[in-house]
Image (cartoon, helix red, strand yellow):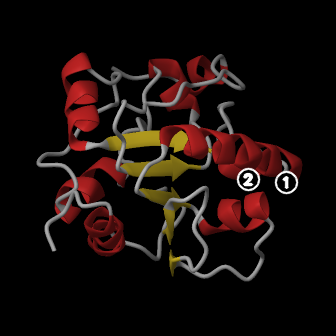
Amino acid sequence: MGFTTAELQAFRDLPMPDFVGPEVRLLLVGINPSLWSAAVQAPFARPGNRFWPALALAGITDRVIDTSGGLSDEDRDYLYDRGIGVSRFVARATARADELTADELREGAAILRQNIATWRPRVVAVVGISAYRIGFGLPKAAAGRQDEPLEGSEVWVLPNPSGLNAHHTTATLADAYREAGRAAGIVPA
């Protein structure tokens, strides 16, 4: 399955739902969906995105999940059974995350806070330090485990898997993600 640039533009600003099961232990939070993700209604779906390969390499999943054509019911159920959920700061799709405004990120953080209070994951792992800093008003936040919980959940700020974040490899992403997976009890210690 593939899309032309013009076809993808038709998905601009479309929302994408959260993918969170009833007993989420690790909530992975992206910035917002790509146009490709909005087109197929699946998280981190753009071919070449390193999110799913990094999760597999980290031991959070036992295989690379391919969402480029959508999230299959089998893969969704697998994630839910493992206690893995995927959300985002902003629901609307853009070609690049830098198209979002600071107000959108702050509004998204407020909604995310409400959702975390409802879902009650053990660990919230935000994959995007800039969105975390802006959204939660913490300009000096550093990557890694945060000192302050969020609605009772432990918080980790992890590198974004976008290809635009070129100073991280799939292996370095996996190393960072593994720590959050251990804290959530998904990856063995």
* Horizontal and vertical percent position of residue 17: 54, 25
Mark 1 secondary-structure assignment: helix
Q: Which residue is mark 2?
A: 98
Q: Quadrant of the C terminus?
A: bottom left
Q: Going by the image, does 69 lie left or right of 97?
A: left
Q: Going by the image, does 10 lie left or right of 23?
A: right
Q: Going by the image, does 92 lie left or right of 153?
A: right
Q: Which residue is mark 1?
A: 102
Dividing the picture into quarters, in which one does residue 5 lie? top right
Indicate the amino acid at tag 2.
Answer: Asp
Query: Could you say which is closer to the camera, residue 185 or residue 74?
Result: 185
Q: Going by the image, does 96 lie left or right of 87?
A: right
Q: Callout 1 environment at 10 Å: few (<14), some (14 to 19), or many (20+)?
A: some
Query: Could you say which is closer to the camera, residue 44 or residue 119?
Result: 119
Q: Can the viewer see residue 95?
A: yes
Vertical relation: 147 (above or below) 177: below
Indicate the amino acid at tag 1.
Answer: Ala
Residue drawn where x is 50% and y is 29% of the image:
36
Q: Quadrant of the N terminus?
A: top left
* Horizontal and vertical percent position of residue 140: 73, 83
Distance from Cα at disc 1 to Cα at disc 2: 10 Å
Mark 2 secondary-structure assignment: helix
Mark 1 touching mark 2, by CB under 8 A?
A: no
Query: Could you say which is closer to the camera, residue 70 or residue 30?
Result: 30
Vertical relation: 132 (above or below) 26: below
Vertical relation: 7 (above or below) 89: above
